[in-house]
Image (cartoon, rainbow, N blue to C red):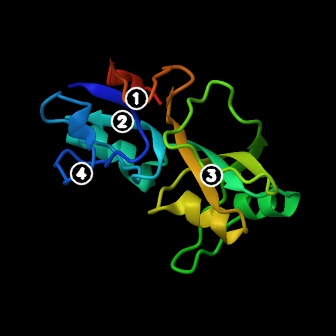
Amino acid sequence: MPLILFNKPFQVLCQFSPQAGRESLADYLRTPDIYPAGRLDADSEGLMLLTDDGRLQHSIAHPDHKEAKTYLVQVDGALEADALARLQAPLDLGDFVTKPCQAVRIAEPGWLWPRTPPIRVRADKPTSWIAITLQEGKNRQVRRMTAAVGLPTLRLIRSSIGPFSLATHPLMPGEWVEVPAGDMKKI
């Protein structure tokens, strides 16, 4: 029963089935009968967990189990205190209201790999970095949250899921490592 930590590169699809002209998980992982426990959209990078254990997959991915997931987000604009407070509080996104979350301003992570292609840089407009930790995970939620407070997302990297993080398991984009599944169940 493998549990695989995978650092999903930018523009890679979170599926094993091929799609013309697009890279997918099958281009990086050859372990049979594993499936992602949760997804990242193609425009997002970072940590994914994959397993062949359906119950474990469900417990990781399902919002009722409240696995904390942390995202490092580079946004277009200067992060002000009021926008940070709005991100932390329940935020009405139209079709749902987010749960309160942790959101803190951070410096650009020194360990972070360059994105290919790089984000657009505008000399006249600053960018800011935020670490956002959610206990839920709706479709494109982090991007929608930052847009709702006037700070469009430029880059989004999931850095941790539950007890696993790219800090404790440094992986470059496209790299993966198998870890004991029991490590997930200890939390």
- The answer to whether mark 2 and mark 1 are in CB contact below 8 A is yes
Q: Please state which of the two labelled residues, at mark 3 or mark 1, is closer to the viewer.
A: 3
Task: Give residue 21's mark.
Answer: 4
| Sequence-first tag of 3 and 2 | 2
Tell me the distance, in whole angstroms, between the alpha carbons under discs 3 and 2: 29 Å
Residue receiving disc 2: 49
| Sequence-first tag of 2 and 1 | 2
The quadrant in which the N terminus is found is top left
Q: Please state which of the two labelled residues, at mark 3 or mark 2, is closer to the viewer.
A: 3
Residue at the outermost bottom position: 94
Name the residue nearer the viewer: 43 or 88.
43
Residue 156 in the figure: left or right of residue 47 = right
Residue receiving disc 1: 184
| Residue type highlighted by circle 3 | Arg
Residue 174: where, in percent of width, then height?
Answer: 37, 30
Which residue corresponds to the image point at 51% horizontal and 55% vertical from the top-left? 136
